[in-house]
Image (cartoon, rainbow, N blue to C red):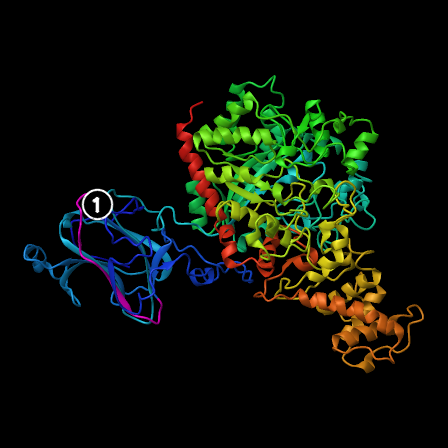
């Protein structure tokens, strides 16, 4: 509420530009002010004060408490005034004269709405010279007394508006130039409070946002700046299954029509390569489970790379959990489409057009909660309307068909960029993907992409020694299945890379056409993503960016300093430092430009961040490889090097990237070692498994138990190592018990082993007398399994009279019972995700689909990240928009 007194001024929407008096509250110094009462005794405060639930009750309907950290209410200075409900008092400035050169009075206000009890006043001292002006208009300028200071005319007053969100008020007080002025802030009631920030007198009339706040008020919400919602249309529709939208029984139907019987490629067009396309790293790993709706016993899962994980319901769940901006990239790989016998056109140009059209249609169908942003102003408005921002992007190998620098023409490059910008609405681009192209060299981190480079360009990577930058990855050592198959078929015959010493990096950097293209992108204000570039290409782009002070982005990245040392700490080549992982120096350059970086959610297996930043020791224990704890190491590294801003998430969902693994169950510590040739084995790290399994605690607590304890949820890499088949049965029995599936009363429980049913009987038994005494002729262990489970559940230990089998089983059952109890964390219960007849649980399933990102964030808080640690993440949508605004600003100076 605004109490403006009649006067010759105009109220203007404003953005502070500067001040000329000590009345400004931008530091902790209140020596220019006098406080009375207790309300302002401990003022000003510093930083954030209000939680999300205080400012926006009901904003996150999923439960949990990961999101209930500080909410940005709009104060532009770190120091501001915010009283408490239980105290009263006033704060009055010293007297000063308004300078005619600074006529605009500006401040921010929020809190209780009542001019009688909570207000900011502008007061003019009664003098002999002004009494004639004001005394005759006491209804407009009431006379007030300031204790100990005399009488004043109240020229203006304003109060809050019933919310903590700051509203900016600005008015022209130039007509009062030379008058003796005081500003007084009053909190005269214990039934409310008042918030004041950024009091200034300005030289110019600025602007304010449409919602009445300052134009640069931070927005709330996290961003995922690397997604592929329309990947089902990529690769000529040859390999990826599942639609992002439509009735779930159709969009997420069983994948056998494309992937063949049992995911083997048999009775499908994809061919024999399909049998190895979805390896999970344990069990009989030929083909894969094809079960989609309604059981979802084949997929989604954290290991999948060729099934839809971004179905609309799952995207909406993440939006409900605080996601406010995604970059949706068109993606493709022509070599992959060819290898899997794509049934339709699969060139990059066509795939871009098709996917961008599909993304626009998707947004249109769900316009009630999402919208494509074509400008930063669009993005601010959309989030202000509490919707999800979609920014369109492209990530392909041969952008615009420009694969060969010898045939590339700069005018054609500009024409294509203008097409994707103006006609398609694309705003975020990868100039280079996994193959060298006309613009520059790609990063080298996987031998398989050398196969791709040869298919697309007719050449293999040319490498050089990159040891000086810490790189230890070497080509020629990868035993990944697809590479081996290509070698055996005689279609992959690279040069002898063993002759090149040290760690291998790409010799190719930014080309002359790449130099032109980057400047052309800048001239249009396109966001430049430098992930996937060789070190030389990155350095080339950053050199241009620094020339024009133009920000860039790392959309889904990792960090070189967090790699394990080759040979001594790991013998898995994918854990060695490679040029795709960014150096601290590169991050600093991006920070200096105002850029944004996003650690990819699957960080594999990396060293503790405290190894390189000792001040972060024990912040989050790095004792569960591939889980949220691993991502936390990378996130902490990022926010430290970026100064606490410009850090988002980069999932690469639907882009052949896995999601974080679970911390409990049969796949805890998954990324230490898993049986996929060329990717998973690591005999040096593998012995840590049992230690990592036992170290987990404080899992994510859900509002309801699981409903689907089928056997597939209790398979994993730990079988045959930390756990045996008996342990596996105990895990399933725990699932049956928690799901309420009681074998005593239900003899039709599906997909459960006999021992699992026996253990479950013991858990459900209400008394010892209920237990079976005699074994089933076909199941001699049933009495022992029931008895052991009963003892564990009731807190008893086996006695000397109990059978040896019971005494042997007891430690196993007790250990897994305790593991399950450790899953029930101390968080506010989180609403569980469901699809069809299936529930999802991050504790045992990991991040199985995109809708479980809120579960991941809850787990991050449970493992040790504080509300303060998570502030940069919940400002990441805002930081991306700020970066985009700078691109728009800087493009004005670039001429092509």
Residue 795 sits in quarter: bottom right
> Which residue is pictured at 30% across the width and 54% down the height?
25
Residue 841 visible in this rendered orientation of the protein: no
Residue on which disc 1 sits: 102
- Was residue 95 drawn as part of the magenta stretch in this picture? yes
Residue 259 point in image, percent of width and height: 76, 42
Nearer the observer, 784 or 584: 584
Residue 551 in the image, given as x and y percentages of width and height:
47, 36
What secondary structure predominates along the stretch shown in magenta? loop
- Residue 270 at x, y = what percent? 77, 36
Q: Residue at x 82, y 40 (%)?
A: 266
- From the viewer's perspective, tell me whether residue 37 is left or right of residue 219: left
Q: Quadrant of the N terminus?
A: bottom left
Q: Residue at x 29, y 53 (%)?
A: 107
Front residue of 722 and 103: 722
Please check the rendered image and state whether residue 479 is part of the magenta-colored stretch, yes or no: no
Q: Nearer the viewer, residue 241 or 806?
A: 806
Q: Which residues are magenta?
A: 84-101
* Mark 1 element type: loop
Q: Position of residue 322 (x, y in %)?
A: 52, 54
């Amino acid at each position: 509420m605004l109490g403006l007194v009649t006067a010759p001024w105009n109220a203007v929407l404003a953005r502070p530009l500067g001040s000329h008096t000590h009345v400004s509250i931008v530091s902790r110094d209140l020596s220019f002010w006098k406080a009375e009462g207790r309300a302002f005794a401990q003022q000003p405060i510093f930083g954030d004060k209000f939680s999300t639930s205080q400012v926006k009750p009901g904003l996150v309907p999923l439960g949990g408490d990961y999101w209930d950290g500080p909410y940005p209410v709009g104060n532009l200075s770190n120091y501001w005034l915010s009283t408490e409900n239980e105290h009263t008092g006033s704060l009055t400035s010293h007297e000063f004269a308004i300078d005619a050169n600074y006529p605009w009075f500006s401040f921010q206000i929020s809190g209780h709405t009542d001019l009688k009890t909570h207000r900011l006043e502008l007061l003019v001292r009664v003098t002999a010279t002004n009494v004639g002006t004001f005394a005759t208009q006491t209804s407009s300028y009431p006379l007030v007394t300031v204790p100990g200071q005399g009488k004043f005319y109240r020229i203006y007053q304003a109060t809050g508006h019933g919310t903590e969100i700051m509203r900016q008020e600005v008015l022209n007080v130039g007509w009062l130039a030379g008058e003796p002025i005081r500003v007084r802030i009053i909190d005269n009631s214990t039934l409310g409070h008042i918030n004041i920030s950024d009091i200034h007198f300005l030289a110019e009339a600025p602007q304010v946002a449409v919602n009445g706040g300052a134009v640069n008020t931070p927005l709330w919400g996290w961003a995922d700046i690397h997604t592929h919602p329309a990947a089902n249309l990529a690769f000529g529709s040859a390999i990826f299954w599942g639609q992002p939208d439509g009735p779930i029984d159709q969009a997420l139907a069983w994948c056998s029509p494309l992937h063949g019987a049992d995911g083997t490629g048999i009775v499908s067009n994809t061919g024999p390569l399909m049998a190895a396309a979805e390896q999970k790293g344990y069990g009989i790993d030929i083909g894969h489970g094809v079960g989609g709706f309604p059981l979802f016993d084949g997929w989604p899962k954290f290991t999948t790379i060729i099934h839809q994980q971004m179905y609309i319901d799952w995207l909406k769940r993440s939006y409900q959990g605080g996601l406010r901006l995604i970059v949706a990239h068109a993606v493709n790989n022509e070599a992959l489409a060819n290898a899997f016998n794509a049934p339709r056109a699969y060139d990059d140009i066509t795939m871009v057009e098709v996917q961008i059209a599909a993304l626009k249609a998707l947004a249109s169908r769900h316009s009630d909660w999402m919208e494509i942003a074509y400008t930063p102003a669009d993005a601010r408005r959309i989030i202000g309307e509490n919707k999800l921002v979609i920014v369109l992007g492209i990530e392909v190998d041969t952008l615009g068909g420009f694969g060969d620098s010898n045939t590339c023409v700069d005018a054609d490059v500009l024409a294509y960029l203008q097409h994707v910008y103006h006609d398609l609405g694309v705003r975020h681009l990868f100039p280079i993907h996994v193959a060298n192209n006309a613009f520059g060299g790609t990063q080298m981190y996987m031998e398989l992409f050398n196969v791709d480079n040869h298919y697309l360009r007719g050449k293999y990577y040319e490498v050089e020694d990159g040891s000086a930058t810490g790189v230890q990855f070497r080509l020629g050592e990868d035993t990944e299945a697809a590479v081996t198959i290509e070698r055996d078929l005689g279609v992959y015959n690279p040069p002898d890379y063993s002759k090149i010493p040290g760690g291998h990096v790409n010799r190719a950097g930014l080309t002359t056409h790449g130099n032109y293209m980057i400047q052309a992108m800048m001239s249009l204000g396109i966001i430049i993503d430098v992930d996937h570039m060789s070190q030389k290409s990155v350095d080339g782009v950053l050199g241009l960016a620094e020339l024009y002070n133009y920000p860039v982005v790392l959309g889904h990245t990792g960090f070189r300093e967090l790699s394990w040392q080759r040979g001594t700490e790991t013998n898995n080549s994918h854990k060695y430092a490679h040029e795709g992982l960014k150096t601290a120096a590169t991050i600093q350059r991006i920070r200096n430009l105002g850029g944004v970086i996003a650690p990819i959610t699957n960080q594999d297996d990396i060293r503790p961040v405290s190894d390189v930043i000792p001040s972060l020791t024990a912040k989050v224990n790095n004792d569960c490889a591939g889980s949220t704890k691993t991502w936390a190491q990378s996130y902490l590294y990022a926010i430290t090097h970026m100064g606490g801003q410009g850090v988002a998430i980069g999932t690469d969902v639907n882009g052949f990237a896995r999601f974080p693994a679970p911390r409990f169950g049969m796949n805890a510590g998954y990324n230490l070692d898993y049986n996929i040739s060329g990717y998973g084995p690591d005999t040096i790290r593998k012995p840590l498994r049992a230690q990592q399994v036992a170290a987990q605690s404080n899992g994510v607590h859900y509002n309801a138990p699981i409903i689907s304890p089928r056997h597939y949820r209790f398979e994993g890499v730990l079988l045959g190592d930390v756990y045996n088949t008996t342990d596996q049965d105990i895990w399933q029995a725990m699932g049956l018990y928690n799901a309420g599936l009681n074998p005593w009363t239900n003899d039709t429980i599906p997909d459960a082993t006999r021992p699992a049913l026996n253990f479950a009987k013991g858990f459900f038994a209400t008394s010892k007398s209920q237990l079976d005494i005699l074994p089933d002729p076909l199941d001699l262990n049933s009495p022992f399994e029931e008895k052991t489970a009963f003892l564990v559940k009731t807190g008893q230990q086996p006695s000397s009279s109990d059978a040896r089998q019971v005494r042997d089983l007891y430690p196993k059952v007790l250990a897994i019972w305790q593991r399950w109890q450790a899953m029930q964390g101390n968080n506010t219960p989180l609403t569980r995700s469901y699809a069809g007849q299936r529930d999802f649980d991050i504790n045992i399933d990991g991040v199985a689909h995109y809708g479980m990102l809120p579960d991941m964030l809850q787990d991050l808080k449970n493992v040790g990240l504080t509300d303060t640690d998570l502030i940069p993440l919940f400002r990441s949508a805002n930081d991306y928009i700020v970066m985009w605004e700078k691109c728009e600003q800087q493009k004005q100076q670039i001429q092509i």
